[in-house]
Amino acid sequence: MSPALQPRRIELGDVVLRPFVLSDEAAVADALRDPDILRWTGGTAVIRTPAELRARRWLEPRIDGWARGSAVFAIADAATDQVLGNVAVRDVNRVPDQAVVTYWVNPSARGRRLGARALNAAARWAFASDGLRLHRLSLDHSLVNEGSCRVATRAGFQLEGIMRDYFVEANGERHDSHLHARLATDPPPQLPGAAAGS
Ligand SMILES: CC(C)(COP(=O)(O)OP(=O)(O)OC[C@H]1O[C@@H](n2cnc3c(N)ncnc32)[C@H](O)[C@@H]1OP(=O)(O)O)[C@@H](O)C(=O)NCCC(=O)NCCS
């Protein structure tokens, strides 16, 4: 298991990255009603949970994630604290100096490049000397998930190759996936909200 992480808040102007709390359950339930969020990020255990219990099933391990080496952030509106999305830096140092990132944005908040901005900010913190001091972050997405590919590329995660039959849906369908990664030494992407705040 990865070592515990200190929960963190990262200010990005109009949005903030902050740990999830139990009162986010309704917002998570709303997000999990989006078929793409459920399909690509829900995970088999959540997908197989009755719909009315899914949000709690998704939320609880993510709130606890920090204690198990996964930095799971809500992307929240800075003014209202409403959850707009999620970005996570998972399995920190399970492979030394590395972690895996995931993200989703609620349909009502799409079209603002929030995914790329949040991913970039989380990556900067993960690489920073006053952050996680990691060297490599990777992510994968099904080849049919073109929006995720755009987010990854915009956030500076270069395409490294195709992993055949890598992603397996809850119904057993297999997908070839892109592997993207960003290194601490890569040039940072040009995006607003890039500062690694406290
Ligand atoms: C992927 C996701 C996070 C993008 O949300 P977002 O950050 O609000 O993205 P935006 O709507 O601002 O679009 C970002 C870019 O992707 C492009 N894009 C978005 N949806 C797209 C689609 N279905 N097909 C092709 N391109 C798409 C946009 O044109 C935009 O491109 P640009 O940056 O070159 O202008 C969101 O669609 C989502 O949560 N999807 C479901 C969960 C998911 O797939 N997560 C990733 C798992 S690997």
Image (cartoon, rainbow, N blue to C red):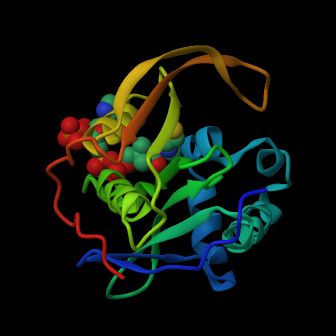
Q: Is 138 placed above or below 125 here? A: above
Q: Where is residue 154 in the image (x, y as percent from the top left)?
A: 25, 41
Q: Quadrant of residue 40?
A: top right
Q: In which quarter of the image is residue 62?
A: bottom right
Instruction: Give the residue drawn at x 61%, y 45%.
Output: 41
- In the picture, measured across the screen, residue 5 lies left or right of residue 68, that is left
Instruction: Give the residue drawn at x 51%, y 31%.
Output: 141
Extreme residue toward the top, this view: 164
Instruction: Give the residue drawn at x 20%, y 43%.
Output: 187
Q: Where is residue 78 in the image (x, y as percent from the top left)?
A: 33, 83
Instruction: Give the residue drawn at x 45%, y 79%.
Output: 82
For ligand 1, which image quadrant applies? top left
Q: Tell me the quarter of the image containing the C terminus.
A: bottom left
Q: In the depicted view, which residue is nearer to us: 116 or 1? A: 1
Q: In the depicted view, which residue is nearer to us: 21 or 93? A: 93
Q: Tell me the quarter of the image containing the N terminus.
A: bottom right
- In the picture, measured across the screen, residue 191 lies left or right of residue 36, that is left
Q: How many labels does the image show?
A: 0
Q: Is 108 placed above or below 147 here? A: below
- In the picture, measured across the screen, residue 161 lies left or right of residue 38, that is left
Q: Position of residue 175 (x, y in %)?
A: 62, 18
- In the picture, measured across the screen, residue 36 lies left or right of residue 156, that is right
Q: In which quarter of the image is residue 23?
A: bottom right
Q: In the depicted view, which residue is nearer to us: 159 or 107? A: 159
Q: Where is residue 60 in the image (x, y as percent from the top left)?
A: 76, 71
Q: Is 164 placed above or below 78 here? A: above
